[in-house]
Amino acid sequence: MRDIGIDNPYYARQWHLHTGFEHVEVDVRSSIRCDEAWSRLAGFGDPRIVVAATDSGCNLAHPAFGGMGKFAGWGYFDGGELRTRGMPGSAAAKMYLPGAHHGTSMCALTSGAVGHSHPLGVAPGCRLLPIRLQTEANRARISEYAMHRILDYVSERADVLLVPLSKLPHFMLSKSVVDRVEELTSSGGRRGSGLVFVCAAGNSNCPIDIDVDVAVPYEVVFGDAQAEPLIKFSKTFRNVLASLPGVLHVSSISSLAQRCHYSCYGPGIDLCAPSSNSRAFRGDALSGLGLTTSTGDPEKPTNRFKGTSGAAALVAGVAALVLSANPGLSASEVCRILQSSASKDLSHTGYDLPPPTSPDAAWDHPLVPLCRRGSFDETGWSPWFGNGKVDALRAVTAAQTWQTMG
């Protein structure tokens, strides 16, 4: 296997992929150890393994992807309809809207190509299937109808589905959508052995699926400099997908192996993975580096990619490596491997709260009582980290030795 540290000028800085970047704001425990996983695989992933990603689209012509062969399919919503590759009138150029970089960055984090002068992804050898959602006020949105169309399109084309969107405090879907998700996790996907769903937990420093006694802020809307911010609170948080087998919700840790301040937490969290760090709502900088990845502009990669969506993209990439190591695994087995092999060697250091007199105190709320500590319980679960930080080396090793029962 070629020395990608030499081949790629960005790799050295990608602390989330390896443990070789010495920096005052990097704790080696934050790395997901892709370099060692690639060595174990003797490669960068199987091109038969496909990760679908719903987001703001993807620049299919970006050189980081190495050509159209990288894509097992693609689709975008136009007038409410999903237009896909091969349909009359569909156009690959419409997969990317100038300035909408997030989707390209997500795809590059998951599977940026080897051999090009661009940041690497977790599973560079695997393929992608991006879907561009409709946007409103520069934010991607997804309707019940769109969910059905997406699930139908990826049902026999992908092995992993990355969903970087979250809706707080209530993420509710119709019974027909939930039933379809359950069906696909058990018997859908390209191999008919289940589709692995990987979801971002959210960036609002609040729980995702719990009832609490104290009102917890989940959104802050800032007006002009003189106006008080509008703070939205809830005592009930619901995520209809949080308890489904085969669906993984991912929180984020910083490059210091510490829970990101903004990261959502609590029941429903399955895994964590590295990302940037900042204070929730206001975005004030905190210790920790961002993720290095591509953007929609080939000339402008970023080292500041952030959020639980970035963490989820890394987990989706590791899921693809696990299936590359053992394509006979079912979706439920992939999820079990990712969770059972996750690292629990993480920092439990929290964050100082602002003084009660601070104007920020009302919305920079302390964690709910159940989730004030990140320690792992007797079952091996943490309200901050889920089952732990995804570890590509341990997951690939487990996949290679996994014995499927029955």
Image (cartoon, grey):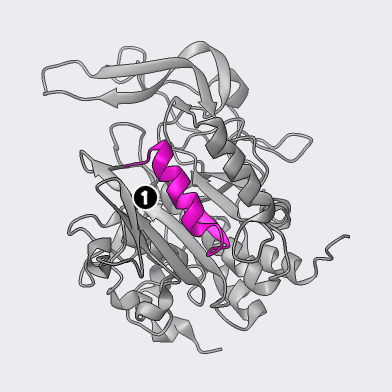
Q: Residue 134: image x %, image y %?
A: 28, 46
Please tell me whether residue 145 is drawn above or below residue 46 in the rendered image: above
Please tell me whether residue 368 is drawn above or below residue 196 in the rendered image: above
Q: Residue 389: image x %, image y %?
A: 60, 51
Q: Residue at x 67, y 62 (%)?
A: 192
> Which three-letter amino acid code belongs to the residue tagged 1?
Lys
Q: Residue at x 60, y 69 (%)?
A: 321
- Nearest the eye: 260 or 89: 89
**What residue is pinned by disc 1?**
306
Which residue sits furthest top?
Answer: 213
- Nearest the eye: 170 or 406: 406
Look at the image and give the residue range highlighted in magenta: 141-164
**Quadrant occupied by the N terminus:** bottom right
Is residue 155 within the magenta segment? yes
Please tell me whether residue 190 is drawn above or below residue 132 in the rendered image: below
Q: Secondary structure at mark 1?
A: loop
Is residue 315 within the magenta segment? no
Q: Residue 43: image x %, image y %?
A: 58, 82
Q: Is residue 198 left or right of residue 293?
A: right
Q: Residue at x 25, y 17 (%)?
A: 230
Q: Residue at x 66, y 78 (%)?
A: 40
